[in-house]
Amino acid sequence: MSAYADSVLAEGETVVYRAAISRWKYFLSYLIGVVLIVLGLVALFFTIMGTDPMIRFAGAIPLVIGLIVIFTAIIRRRTTELVLTDRRIIAKRGFVSRETVEMNLSKVESLHVSQGLMGRMLDYGDVSVVGTGASLEPLRGVSRPLELRRKLGELADFPVLQKPVRG
């Protein structure tokens, strides 16, 4: 789902890399959602023989909450974009309300990658782009963050990441 990034590309601008948010970032949400769904199904199973509709309704509450938790995590993951083009970095979050930040590559000073033990094992981490005068808010849970850093370093017109020539 990269409708935003595709809609703001300038003429002749090409996408070099599209980063995605890792499913592992939302593991806890998925786990809580599944547990609530199972509890709701068990409650519904045991209350199906009951005659009181309020008891059945109470049994359905964890099921509905579990579905909402999982659905919210999926929407958040799918509506976050981080796109590296040959001219800039584009970051977008949100579905109903949208937050976007774009930074020209000429303004980028560095790209920080932070990975904990689980992040290294499962290949995800937090990415922060530091630029002249401002920085992008860190994107948390980006899949393959070192690949993003490598692609950024490969851009030929990006002098900040090139090794200085000593003479």
Image (tube, helix red, strand yellow):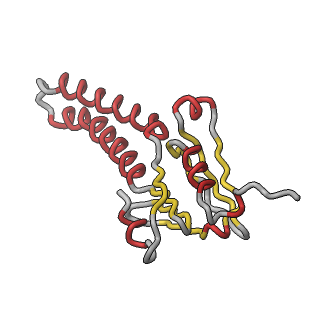
Residue that appears at 59% across and 43% down: 146
Residue that appears at 67% across and 69% down: 107
Residue 48 position, x and y percent, is 13, 27
Asked if 85 appears above or below 112 in the picture, the reply is below
Give 152 or 124, whichever is nearer the viewer: 152
Residue 87 appears left or right of 68 = right
Give 8 or 136, whichever is nearer the viewer: 8
Residue 73 position, x and y percent, is 40, 45
Q: In which quarter of the image is residue 115?
A: top right
Asked if 110 appears above or below 9 in the picture, the reply is above
Residue 22 position, x and y percent, is 46, 42
Please identify the quadrant where the C terminus is shown.
bottom right
Give 52 or 102, whichever is nearer the viewer: 102
Residue 97 appears left or right of 124 = left
Asked if 30 appears above or below 78 in the picture, the reply is above
Please identify the quadrant where the N terminus is shown.
bottom left
Asked if 131 appears above or below 58 in the picture, the reply is below
Q: In which quarter of the image is residue 33?
A: top left
Residue positioned most to the bottom:
11
Residue positioned most to the right:
167
Residue that appears at 46% across and 34% down: 28
Residue that appears at 52% across and 60% down: 84
Residue 40 position, x and y percent, is 27, 31
Residue 157 appears left or right of 163 = left
